[in-house]
Amino acid sequence: MSDAPDKLERDVEASRGRLDRTLADLQARFNQPGIPRDLADLRRSGQAASETVERIAQDVRLNPVPALLIAAGFGLLVYEAFRTAAERRRLTLVPSATAMPDRRLPENHPDPMHARLDDALEESFPGSDPVSVRITK
């Protein structure tokens, strides 16, 4: 039973040592000469972005119609992109093996009555008759 507390103490000490080394490594990396400069640049770029957003908001307040037209155009562009993507997904979901070929569709096979009417129409008004056109000024 005395081995268990000693072993736990050694594990805790080993964990502390690893944690100390990890913290020292992080501190050494953070104290490199480029890091503070990068952080300052990041702060300046954040301020510039904030100023840009404020300028855009002011322009929108002064000229709302162009801003609304731009937003509507962008909205239509996004809508069309989503609609096209949905149409593509819908078309890819239809398996071509189960699709019925056109020759098997019943609407592509006229009944005999329609065929006879077509023949009678062709006999009454043949396509080979010359058509006369007179152009007058």
Image (tube, helix red, strand yellow):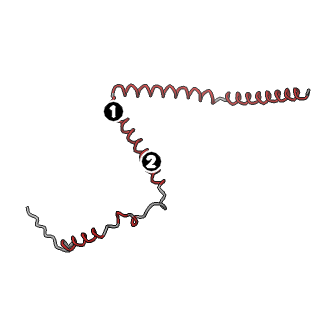
Q: Percent position (x, y) of residue 24?
A: 74, 28
Snapshot quadrant of residue 11: top right
Q: Are marks 2 and 1 in contact (CB under 8 Å)?
A: no
**10 Å crowding of disc 1: few (<14), some (14-19), many (20+):** few
Classify the position of the C terminus by image quarter. Answer: bottom left
The one of 25 and 16 positioned closer to us in this rendering: 16
Snapshot quadrant of residue 69: top left
Alpha-carbon span between mark 2 and mark 1: 30 Å
Q: How many marks?
A: 2
Placement of 134 over or under 60, stated as above or below: below
Between disc 2 and disc 1, the foreground one is 2
Please give the name of the residue rendered at 40% of the width and 66% of the height, measured from the top-left corner: 104
Q: Secondary structure at mark 1?
A: helix
Placement of 86 over or under 21, stated as above or below: below
Please state which amino acid type lies under the numbered disc 2: Ala
Q: Secondary structure at mark 2?
A: helix
18 relative to 129 in the view: left or right: right
Q: Percent position (x, y) of residue 106?
A: 37, 64
112 relative to 79 in the view: left or right: left
14 relative to 87 in the view: left or right: right
Please give the name of the residue rendered at 13% of the width and 70% of the height, measured from the top-left corner: 132
Please state which amino acid type lies under the numbered disc 1: Pro
Q: Percent position (x, y) of residue 90?
A: 45, 51
Query: Which of marks 1 and 2 precedes in the sequence?
Result: 1
Label at residue 66: 1
Q: Percent position (x, y) of residue 91?
A: 45, 54
Q: Which residue is mark 2?
A: 86
